[in-house]
Amino acid sequence: MKIKDIRLGYLSIPLKTPFKTALRSVSSIDDVIVMVETDDGHIGYGEVPPTAAITGETKESIVSAILNHLRPPLIGKEIEDIESIMQVLHGSLVGNSSAKAGVDIAIYDLYGQRYQAPVYQLLGGYRTHLTTNLTISVNEPEEMVRDSIDAVKRGFHTLKIKVGKNSAKDIERLMAIRQAVGNDIQLRIDANQGWSQKEAIRILTQMEDAGLNLELVEQPVAAHDLKGLKKVTEKVSIPVMADESVFSPRDAVELLQTGAADLLNIKLMKTGGIYNALKIAAIAETFGVECMMGCMLEAKISVNAAAHLAAAKKIITRIDLDGPALCLEDPIDGGAEFNESVISLSNTPGFGIKHIHNLKLI
């Protein structure tokens, strides 16, 4: 099974409600779709969200990176030689982690098809079902309360609350949500780098004193501020999760050796795909640090791939794969079943994606 060609397309999916964080606000998913074709007629599917505020990548840069730098050296490669493929993929250009991830996902899809097994089984096969949280976008407290109540009615038992835009209001938001949903619902908060070190310590201490009972806080300070992240981790009792601070295995080692975070958030678009995500999971396991499997604002193809990795590894104990639940429609046939908070893995070879409707080929 040799790589014959790599083609691209655009896919746009409207969201149920605008997605708002401390970094951006969007109303639809507009992603680049990757199709790796083999000489025997198989197709592996990948997906790349342009998330310039986090990875620095745009639609235009993603298309250029794949077609001009990743595609040429991969043509003719044997799918079973996955180590060789990944060395070429990651050595073809610096950065561009999401572009690499899209190709990586498609390659692993074909790898599963080659050996007639779902990818999660090939990577470890620890579980077949996952339970994800649902993200509550940052808005006025009243709207966030309504969204939180609606999420609970839909069957979500864990909510990830976006904060970081207004520190005074963040506490008001969380207190209103906790009062509305009660103490049985687990709350996680994500500041998306929205606070300074001192601000994060002050706000989180106030949240602790208010008895909000938060499971964790994700990326409270700027991605590059590892000293600040470490200080927050040391000063507050709420577990601190690194997200934008950890892209590579090297980042994971530095974070864990210095004790800068209690938990790691693995996202395929940061790691460059499954190949490096597996390394980060192994590093975390070595340090005894649990991981979350997260996603950017992505549709079913790449979130499905992330679900396979999460299902494969025991060290991945928390799931933030709610992209499909945020979409107004699902134009993708096949893959895992996303039923609100429950994700059920398919036993179809590869990642199980069969067809993509409304795809505009490039």
Image: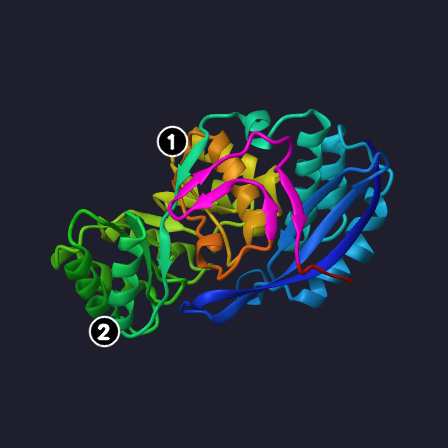
Q: Is residue 8 visible?
A: yes
Residue at (53%, 62%) from the top-left corner? Answer: 54
Is residue 341 a member of the stretch shown in magenta? yes
Residue 310 locus on image (x, y percent): 48, 37
**Structural distance between the alpha carbons of marks 1 and 2:** 35 Å
- In the displayed structure, would residue 291 be above or below residue 246? above
Q: Which residue is mark 2?
A: 168
Is residue 271 a member of the stretch shown in magenta? no
Residue at (14%, 60%) from the top-left corner? Answer: 179
Residue 14's mark? Answer: none
- In the displayed structure, would residue 216 be above or below residue 63? above
Task: Characterize the local packing of mark 2: few (<14), some (14-19) or many (20 or more) Cα atoms within 10 angstroms.
Answer: few
Task: Characterize the local packing of mark 1: few (<14), some (14-19) or many (20 or more) Cα atoms within 10 angstroms.
Answer: few
Classify residue 148 as left or right of residue 339.
Answer: left
Q: Secondary structure at mark 2?
A: helix
Residue at (67%, 47%) from the top-left corner? Answer: 355
Q: Nearer the viewer, residue 259 or 35?
A: 35
Residue 321 locus on image (x, y percent): 45, 48
Q: Amino acid at mark 2?
A: Ala
Classify residue 121 as left or right of residue 338.
Answer: right
Residue 288's mark? Answer: 1
Q: Amino acid at mark 1?
A: Gly
Q: Is residue 188 visible?
A: no
Quarter where residue 142 is shown: bottom left
- In the displayed structure, would residue 268 be above or below residue 275? below
Q: Which residues are magenta?
A: 332-357
Quarter where residue 98 is shown: bottom right
Q: Nearer the viewer, residue 135 or 55?
A: 135
Quadrant holding the N terminus: top right
